[in-house]
Image: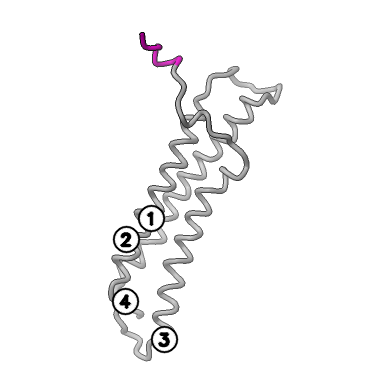
Amino acid sequence: MTEPKSDRKHWARDLKVTLWTLIVPPTIWAVHFLFCYLWVAVTCAKSSRPGTALTGFPLATLIATIVALLGIVAAGYIARVQSETPGDPAPHEQGTAIDRLRFLALSTRLLAGLSFVAVIFTALPVIMFGDCR
């Protein structure tokens, strides 16, 4: 027989949540930001003409953006599953392990949403502008 859906364990609930998991989404955004802007800066600095085309760069940025967004969505999904771990209802006055887990998971979800938007805003100018002007 199968267990009811509420009693099943989800693989993401078994993962250990620490402060390190909290910084995964902003770190992905920071790496994406550095990739996009450093590549453009180096390409444009090496060029002698101000209208140098960034050949192939918008495609590379699009691929890097998709990879970054997938990583952020994965971190957000894991945090969502962990934030829905059953426990005492609010207010959380005792500071139990479940309460800490849900707090870190909720914080990770919020940072994942912010990082998702930040990655999109980082990629837009790089994809839209095709040269070094």
Judged by depth in the image, the label closer to the viewer, 1 or 3, is: 3
Which residue is disc 1 drawn over? 120
Distance from disc 4 to disc 2, alpha carbons, whole Å, reads: 13 Å
In the image, residue 84 above or below residue 88: below
First-in-chain label (1 vs 2): 2
For numbered disc 4, what is the local secondary structure? Answer: loop
Amino acid type, label 4:
Leu
Q: Position of residue 27 (x, y in %)?
A: 53, 54
Label 1 neighbour load within 10 Å: few <14, some 14-19, many 20+: some
Residue at image location 47% in from the left, 47% down from the top: 114
Give the label on residue 49, or none: none
Distance from disc 1 to disc 3, alpha carbons, whole Å, reads: 27 Å
Residue at image location 65% in from the left, 26% down from the top: 97
Amino acid type, label 3:
Lys
For numbered disc 2, what is the local secondary structure? Answer: helix
Give the label on residue 54, or none: 4
Amino acid type, label 2:
Leu
Give the label on residue 46, or none: 3
Q: Position of residue 29 (x, y in %)?
A: 47, 55
Give the label on residue 62, or none: 2
Q: Position of residue 103 (x, y in %)?
A: 59, 32
Span highlighted in magenta in the image? 1-7
* Of the pair 89 and 79, the residue shown nearer to us: 79
Label 3 neighbour load within 10 Å: few <14, some 14-19, many 20+: few
First-in-chain label (1 vs 4): 4
For numbered disc 3, what is the local secondary structure? Answer: helix
For numbered disc 1, what is the local secondary structure? Answer: helix
First-in-chain label (4 vs 3): 3
Residue 125 is covered by the magenta coloring: no
Judged by depth in the image, the label closer to the viewer, 1 or 4, is: 4
Q: Tell me the quarter of the image containing the N terminus.
A: top left
Residue at image location 62% in from the left, 26% down from the top: 99
